[in-house]
Image (cartoon, helix red, strand yellow):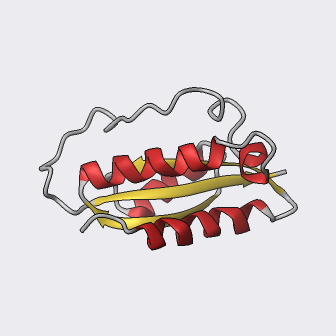
Amino acid sequence: MPVTQSARERILSTISSLCTIARLDYLYIGYTRKPATAHATDSARIKFPFHVVLADRLTQSEAIELEDCLFKAVTRNKRSIEYRKYHPEKRDGPSRKSYGGHKSPTSSRTHSVYCTWCVK
């Protein structure tokens, strides 16, 4: 089942709430096909110790579409706190829909969209 508009709004509200954390340096929204715990461990290795799954049990196309929608919403307004807190090397580039080189059955509901962040 595709992610509803009300679910997207709740997810964006969650991201906005994260951005109010005073010590939050920057965040990143991404897609993964890995289980949440495995992906969180990988994120911690590259200096993103905090991780939350925003939506899971999605098909690959649902997850990619949601990631793209969230990226565009967060980076649309350059004056917003969400934009300022988004990863500085990623926020001004184009949204690149990518499956990360991994293919799985399109109907498989094993994909997630996450938010990871680091602190100052």
Q: Residue at x 25, y 61 (%)?
A: 110
Asked whether, in this view, residue 110 is left or right of residue 64, the answer is left
Relative to 66, residue 83 above or below: above
Asked whether, in this view, residue 109 is left or right of residue 19, the answer is left
Q: Residue at x 34, y 53 (%)?
A: 63
Q: Residue at x 60, y 42 (%)?
A: 46
Horizontal and vertical percent position of residue 14:
62, 69
Relative to 107, residue 55 above or below: below
Asked whether, in this view, residue 6 is left or right of residue 108, the answer is right
Relative to 95, residue 49 above or below: below
Q: Nearer the viewer, residue 83 or 103?
A: 83
Q: Residue at x 35, y 35 (%)?
A: 98
Relative to 96, residue 33 above or below: below
Horizontal and vertical percent position of residue 54:
49, 65
Q: Nearer the viewer, residue 46 or 115?
A: 115
Numbered disc total:
0
Q: Nearer the viewer, residue 115 or 74?
A: 74
Horizontal and vertical percent position of residue 102:
25, 38
Q: Nearer the viewer, residue 19 or 49?
A: 19
Asked whether, in this view, residue 37 is left or right of residue 18, the answer is left
- Quarter holding the N terminus is bottom left
Horizontal and vertical percent position of residue 75:
65, 42
Location of residue 4 (image quadrant): bottom left
Location of residue 116 (image quadrant): bottom right
